[in-house]
Image (cartoon, rainbow, N blue to C red):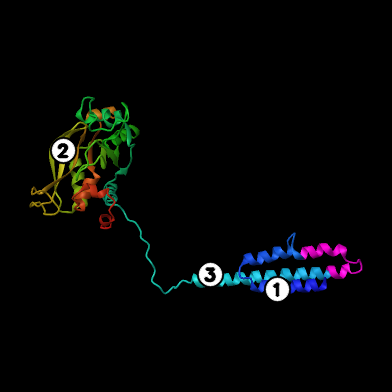
Amino acid sequence: MFEQLAELQKRTAEQIANSDTPEKLNEIKVALLGKKGELTAIMKSLKDVAPEDRPKIGQMINDARAQIEKALDEAAQNMQKLVMEKKLKAEVIDVTLPSKKPVIGHRHPNMIALEEVERIFIGLGYEITEGPEIEKDYYNFEALNIPADHPAKDEQDTFYINGEMLLRTQTSSTQIHAMENSKPPIRILAPGRVFRADEVDATHSPSFHQIEGLVVDKGITFADLKGTLAEFAKEMFGEDTKVKFRPHHFPFTEPSAEVDVSCFKCGGSGCRFCKGSGWIEILGCGMVHPRVLEKCNIDPNEYTGFAFGVGLERIALLKYEIDDMRLLYENDERFLKQF
């Protein structure tokens, strides 16, 4: 048995020395110290040894077991160190190399234009507000003085969900919510997405954005509207920009007007950008119709107000000289990187 233990220790030492993976070390450990291992079998054979020799042989077996376990542990630790050193060498970072700059996104041209419009009107004391995109017929039409037989309510222009609900066709519905939930004075700017059954082309889309402005207070006149929009045009398109008001009709304003700005490319002399006229149409506006005020429980004999609506895409197309509205939604990086 003495010779058997010595031979086992020698052979185990050679096997450990020749092992190059943790899996091989584990195989050696199981083959020697497992339930059916060689050393375990020797320990079980102690019952066949003479009683007077058992203590000595038992001690030798325990010593052999301790030495084998120690050798296995040391080999495993050395192997882990080698693996770590190899990994560190493979993952060395050369801090002298130039860094790679991460690609960071930026604001969409629509968002750039919107933030510029919001900055201007916040400076004039307006509050930014929002309204629902899925709207009731009442808020989108009836409360805005649009009767049931008005052409704007034709299903060819409006996306109806059912007889009562629809996708809003204009952000003007937000002013009704604002007047219902707030008492004058009211100064709001309401940007948002709107939907109309339009064919897609260079200037039309079934989904686009509008910005609605509303002021209601005592003593508000058309002169206030003209002064506000003149200031907006100068801030948006340049200090030399002029505005021109042309009579128009909107069911929810009276009187109503469309607003042109002098061409900021040619200064009004006429060019391709303004189609030779020297003027560019940008928005519609007017004094809030008395019936609209009454619908919102605001006395039109005490309060007056004005409203205006401008297409966000219209502003972006003009300000950044974009010829086709579809470019704003095609997500072509060659186009977007220009902003």
Say which of 236 and 48 sits in front.
48
Q: Where does the C terminus fall, quadrant-wise?
A: bottom left
Sequence order check: which comes first, mark 1 or mark 3?
A: 1
Mark sitting on residue 13: 1
Circle 1 packing at 10 Å, graded few (<14), some (14-19), many (20+), is some
Say which of 234 and 94 sits in front.
94
Is residue 57 located in the magenta-colored stretch of the structure? yes
Q: Amino acid at mark 2?
A: Ala
Which of label 1 and label 3 is nearer to you?
A: 1
Would residue 292 be seen by someone viewing this image from the given angle? yes
- What's the magenta bit mostly, secondary-structure-wise? helix
Marks 2/3 in contact by CB < 8 Å: the verdict is: no
Say which of 195 and 177 sits in front.
195
Above or below, 141 relative to 237 = above
Q: Give x and y (percent) for residue 41.
A: 79, 63
Say which of 292 and 162 sits in front.
162
Please state the extent of the stretch shown in magenta in the rendering. Answer: 39-58
Q: Which residue is mark 3?
A: 87
Place residue 96 in its image quadrant. Answer: bottom left
Is residue 76 located in the magenta-colored stretch of the structure? no
